[in-house]
Amino acid sequence: MISNLRSTVQLASYLPKTLSLIWQSAHHWTIAWLILLVLQGCLPVATLYLTRSLVDRLVAVVGAGLQPETIRLVMLPIALFGGVLLLTEILKGISEWVRTAQAEIVQDYISDLVHQQSLAIDLACYESSEYHDYLNRARSGAGGRSLALMENLGILLQSSITLISVIAILLPYGILLPIAIVIGTLPGFYVVLRLNRHHHQWWQKTTLDRRWLEYYEIVLTHSAAAAEVRVFGLGTHFRTAYQTLRQRLRLEHLQLIKQRSLGRFGANLITLLVLSGAIVWIGQQMLLGLITMGDVALFYQAFNRGQELMKSLLGNIGEIYKNSLFVSNLFAFLNLEPKVVDPPQPKTIPSSLQQGIRFRQVSFKYPGSQHLVLENFNLTIPAGKIVAIVGDNGAGKTTLTKLLCRFYDPESGSVELDGVDLKNFSVADLRKAITVLFQFPLRHVATPAENITFGNLAESANLPAVETAAQAAGIHERILRLPQEYNSLLGTSFPGGVDLSGGEWQRLALARAFFRQAPIIILDEPTSAMDPWAEMDWLNRFRILAQGQTAIVITHRFTLAMRADLIYVMRDGKIVESGSHDELVTQGGLYAESWQAQMYSSERETDQGMHLSFTQILRLKAKKLLQFPEL
């Protein structure tokens, strides 16, 4: 009982927040909507009084006969009655237009809030199942629920105005009539509250199920999965999984609807009994000559309208309660706070590094994991050098990129630029100073020019720089062969779009990275989709373009690593070797063994050898499937 009371109080706190949100986004439309609601709330009362006047005058006309004077007697209430009905329809149409405009503005405003929060939240959240539950609930009709909550409050206001007027009409006939209206509607109010809570609990409980449905939908319909689903014959498997889950959710939902229907039937039965009693009382009063026929019409309409209004009022309170439950999910999402934040007084990022990048005694583990990916890790990347980091999968190479971009902060230790901890810089300024080519870059459905300028939107009008970046990445000639060259739409999702090969998309991403002109370049497997000849051509271009910049290249390919100024070999979160290619080969350690294995493999089968990676060599050696003589 106490917990339910606390929950209700907490939900009530979301009402002013929701109203404030709606006011901020569309206050002019909200004012217009409220004025219309007040007017619409007053018109039904005028209709009741006009009905009584019209009935009484019609009775008088029937008693006196059809005379010109008596006909004129009924013309005025008829005209007024028609005018009120016409005004009601006009206000209804205007109100619908105003509400639609308000709804779209508020919906866009809330969507933008969700987008802003998604961009501001830590990358760590995206690796948390709990965060995806929050996001799913916030996106699943949060804007619609906020608008519904506003509409519920509006109907509550309109119903209250009309109900107060109706009660004022009924009070002269006795206090028992308004009390009967309340008694007849309370059971329905209780049923609505109880079932709304059950529905919300079910909706919360099935969040993960709905996310699985979204996943199955993507696998069954998305182009990225289409080929593999067909090759392995997975279509029936995923269709069955989708249909099985949908059937379970459908049955659970129908059970809730059944409970609601039965509950409302019982509540409506009580309402019907109260209305029947009121009708008997009206008939008795008329037979006794205590009220006129107009009073009967007024009383019946007022009592019946009063019950409907009371049901509407209490029903809307129930809807407010239900929508508050759903809106609470939106505010729970918006209240998430990032852990990676700006310092009170950010320092200025150097335009070019003088000392370099340093990882000093860094320990780090991913959220939700107890395993330290890095422990007391130390690494120095000299300014203006190309540094390659090689190692097996899971060695921690990509983690270095995430820490350097401040997607995460280390558990202990520091990551420094020219001796200054990254935490002392603005996050936005830090990321502007870094360009990253991820292993699986985004394939933007946009033109080649737009794909490249996404690297630095501030220079989007600099078309010569766009072409220079494309030439540097070796994609310029391919773009010129497209139907509209740099203005061609890439991707086949929309009409007129053309697609590129995997290697060409990677070159386009490289051009985007070059276009950014940042002092720090991070490339994660930049040539994984290129053939050896294209890779060699790109390497020659890259060394020229990277002059004066600090470049970090994460790779499995020795052909790429050997051209770096400095190579670090990582294993199990530690640096086990470092030096130039020649120095590492001379040392005879892990790098030298892997290099020898690749050279030996190249002699036996050149094409295979050129593609043999550091990780593949380690796995083959561990399984004793690769033997080679000393060089």
Image: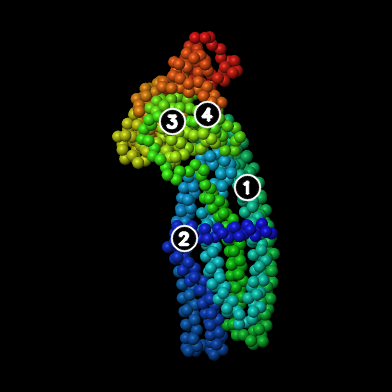
Q: Nearer the viewer, residue 343 or 480?
A: 343
The one nearer the camera, 560 or 265, is 560
Residue 439 percent coordinates (x, y): 47, 30
Position of 420 relative to 322 (above/below): above
Circle 4: element type: strand
Looking at marks 4 and 3 on the same chain, the residue that comes earlier in the sequence is marked by 3
Q: Is residue 440 visible?
A: no
Residue 357's disc is 3
| Dot 2 amino acid type | Trp
Q: Which residue is mark 4?
A: 377
Q: Amino acid at mark 3?
A: Ile
Q: Position of residue 1 (x, y in %)?
A: 69, 59
Q: State the residue at coordinates (61%, 75%).
A: 303
Sooner in the amino-acid sequence: mark 1 or mark 4: 1
**Circle 3: is it few (<14), some (14-19), or many (20+) Cα within 10 Å?**
many
Q: How far separated are the C-alphas under marks 1 and 3? A: 47 Å
Mark 2 lies on residue: 23
Which tag, 2 or 3, sits closer to the chain's start?
A: 2
Q: What separation in Å lies between label 2 and label 3 (alpha carbons)?
A: 48 Å
